[in-house]
Amino acid sequence: MRAVTVLPGILNSVQLEDVPEPPLADGEILVRTIALGICGTDHEILEGLYGSAPPGAERLVLGHESLGVVEDAPAQSGFLPGDHVVGIVRRPDPVPCPSCAAGEWDMCRNGGYTERGIKERNGFGSERFRIERGFAVKVDRALGLAAVLMEPTSIVAKAWDHVERVGRRSEWWSAETVLVTGAGPIGLLAAMMGRQRNLKVHVLDRNVAGPKPELIRDLGAVHHAGLESLGDMQFDVVMECTAATPLVVEAMKRCAPSGIVCLLGVSSPGSKTEFDIGGFNRKLVLNNEVVFGAVNANLGHYRQAADTLKRADRKWLDRLITRRVPLANWREAYVPQKGEIKVVLMFSDL
């Protein structure tokens, strides 16, 4: 079968090659791959900045945003041939740490976890893959290709889950306003989930043309192309989704008293900016504000994501997928184009 593989740590080493069928050790459920979503993590791996191959292997099969259809599953596994499924990315460490032992591998404390398509485990970027029943999530077939958005939606579901948990530190706290910085897939999904909560959502994104401003408006959110249009507004919840250092600083400035800032972008080390840490500390402490980071997701968050996508406007979700690339043209999928949102590599028909 064919798979997209890379030599971790080696720039421009990606290729489409023939690989053996997935081993039973990967899981008892055999899945035919429909589509693979591509994100910033994939591009970092392609640039040689991130990623590691399975023990004893040189190459890593890429892909952690999956969508497939079950071809074979054991009886009483909860899955049947024809079911559409998405694979969970992270696996708990073998020790395990307290978080992994509790099923919260997204909060692993010792770094011993593995991740499909990223860290020490082959990903879903092959014509077929196997997966364990406890790490496969059934999705509504009616979602069609939009189900490939499950993995990024799970990350945002975790972010909202943790925001609301932090908010419950005070019995009276409730959010009314949200600022989302960035209108990539994560930012747009964060805005969508804010609107599903009937919150007043503002999205800061520099694009004034292309699909993003219209997608923001069609959510019933407010689009801001520049900081000046925000005036002196502050927000109960801020979700920073760009990882751009100036916007990380701005996000913390825009937090209202008793507000919560969630950092969802992963910045590159070495990026520096002038920052008044004393003023930040004063504002944070005197206003009871919280700033935290969130990454990855556990099974509960994937289930929340499945519910979120099921309740979303299907036509709006479909518009997030701005480019579908057939496997025959696979290299094109890894070449970013200006203004696009989500690129999907198609392995087979729905």
Image (spheres, rainbow, N blue to C red):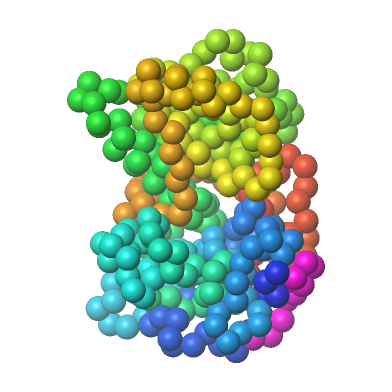
Q: Residue at x 47, y 70 (%)?
A: 114
- Please tell me which residue lies in front, 229 or 20: 229
Q: Residue at x 23, y 26 (%)?
A: 170
Stretch in magenta: 10-19
Q: Quadrant of residue 122?
A: bottom right
Q: Residue at x 64, y 63 (%)?
A: 50
Q: Is residue 290 above or below residue 295?
A: above
Q: Is residue 320 above or below residue 301?
A: above
Is residue 132 among the parts visible in the rendering? yes
**Residue at the extreme left of the image, as rendered:** 171
**Considering the image in quadrants, where does the C terminus appear?**
bottom right
Left-right relation of 126 to 13: left
Is residue 191 among the parts visible in the rendering? no
Left-right relation of 343 to 121: right
**Residue at the extreme top of the image, as rendered:** 232
Q: Quadrant of residue 229?
A: top right
Residue 28: % across, % down: 38, 82
Residue 119: % across, % down: 54, 69
Predominant secondary structure in magenta? loop
